[in-house]
Image (spheres, helix red, strand yellow):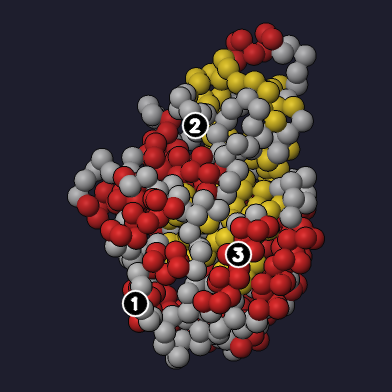
Amino acid sequence: MLYTHATIITVNPAREIVLDGSVLVNDAFIRDIGKTEVLTSIYSDEEIYDLTGHIIIPGLISAADDLELVSWLCERIWVLQGNFTPEDGYAAARISIAEMLKTGTTCFLESMFADRYGFSGLCKAVEESGIRACLGKIVMDLGKYAKDPKWAMHPGLVENREQSLVGTLKMHEEWNNKASGRIKVWFGARTPGGVSTALYKEMTSLSREKNIPVTMHCAEVKADREYFASLTPPHTPMSYCSSVGLLGPSTVLVHMVHLDDSDIHTLADSRTHVAHCPTSNAKLASGIARVPDLLTAGVNVGLGTDGAPCNNTNDLLQEMKLAGIIHKAASGDPTLVPAETVLEMATINGAKALGLDSEIGSLEVGKKADFVALDMRKVGLQPYYSPVSAVVYAATGSDVSLTVVDGNVVVEKWRLLTMNEEEVWREADRRGHEVVERAGLAEKVKARWPTV
């Protein structure tokens, strides 16, 4: 297939933008990129897909998928999650993946999928949908958050070493590299306080031995930093992570809001990756990550939406806009984290974080054909002069008309091809309400304003 007449933001090493460009795709790979006039002449027998008026970008990579965080977790989210069934987990995975594909995300990292949700169901949803995914299964052995015993997890979510660590190894044997290589199974460690030091060390040893990457939420709120400081001996977030073997180029740490200078230097020296989730951090009043300092230090920073409950959307294009403006507002410096850096975070940086940058994250000959096309022929998007700025600051997921993963068209003209969209959202809506009822939270989650 020859995709023609688009503006192509390649994010290749030269960061070239091809005007009136074309992309040739065969057998899941990009075979050529260039001017439409040239490629249509060379490949005159190829089927044409006209993308006049569109911008093509690499498929977006999500490096992570009203109360402050701890109360919100303990009183609402963990209660709901502790009442999940595997069927609920499958329905939740399907609607999240459907939204991601329709809004331009072609690859995502799931950080913490609990055993009770049914990990095989998650893998099945990925396989069926056509998306690419790195899936972190929970590793834990303590049912609390940070240092306060009041912050206990719902009993339905507590797992032991055998369920979590050993269970992840079993899932890795069963699912890693399945779905034509689109599925990767990771360790998804719970935040310090939910995992014993001994289990962290066992997990990181196995990670190195079996080449299984690790992801973990870390330093998200002040309580996390206070927990590290309360240990004997006292630690910073990164000195503790270093002490248990968590740091390195096969680890993605999510959020990373409450860091000091020594933490940032340790991250850079260890080549550990960070997933920035600005909307989640803002909504839950967790703070603003020191992304400009992380980037200056040479830390690879990707972008994520975090979970839908703490963001309300999986639209990574919306996340890009906030990532591009929040650090300007916080610093008073409008030059910080420019649009080009934000697009790198959502594409090639995310690919690096997942260890997939030789395959995805940019549009280059020989890489996997993972890309999306945004229809710019709209009053809210015209006129534009910088394609990158238009994508980062003006476009949203609703502008994605085409999504291609592994060379396969999975969204075309805004329609999801791999799943029945109405069936997906109706099933998720039904099961979502059933979970709320089982959890006894119907009164707590209803609208604050009167419904009549």
Distance of mark 1 from mark 2, alpha carbons? 42 Å
Mark carried by residue 11: 2
Apparent side of residue 409 relative to residue 239 in the rendered image (left or right): right
Q: Picture coordinates of residue 178 (x, y %)?
A: 78, 51
Q: Mark 1 or 2 closer to N-term? A: 2
Binning the other alpha carbons within 10 Å of mark 2 as few (below 14), some (14 to 19) or many (20 upward) gives many
Q: In the rendered view of the protein, which quadrant contains the N terminus?
A: top right
Element type at marker 2? loop
Q: Amino acid at mark 1?
A: Pro
Q: Amino acid at mark 3?
A: Ser
Is 251 above or below relative to 412? Answer: below
Q: Amino acid at mark 2?
A: Val
Spot the residue most to the left. 332
Could one spot residue 440 in this view of the protein?
Answer: yes
Apparent side of residue 205 relative to residue 121 in the rendered image (left or right): left
Element type at marker 1? loop
| Identity of the residue drawn at 70% across and 77% down | 163
Q: Quadrant of residue 263?
A: bottom left
Q: Quadrant of residue 414?
A: top right
Residue at the disc numbered 3: 205
Is 346 above or below relative to 309? Answer: above
Q: Number of numbered discs present?
A: 3
Mark carried by residue 96: none
Residue at the disc numbered 1: 234
Element type at marker 3? helix
Distance of mark 3 from mark 2, alpha carbons? 35 Å
| Identity of the residue drawn at 73% across and 11% down | 44
Spot the residue most to the bottom. 150
Is 115 above or below relative to 274? Answer: below
| Identity of the residue drawn at 42% across and 33% down | 388
Distance of mark 1 from mark 3, alpha carbons? 23 Å
Q: Picture coordinates of residue 35 (x, y %)?
A: 57, 15
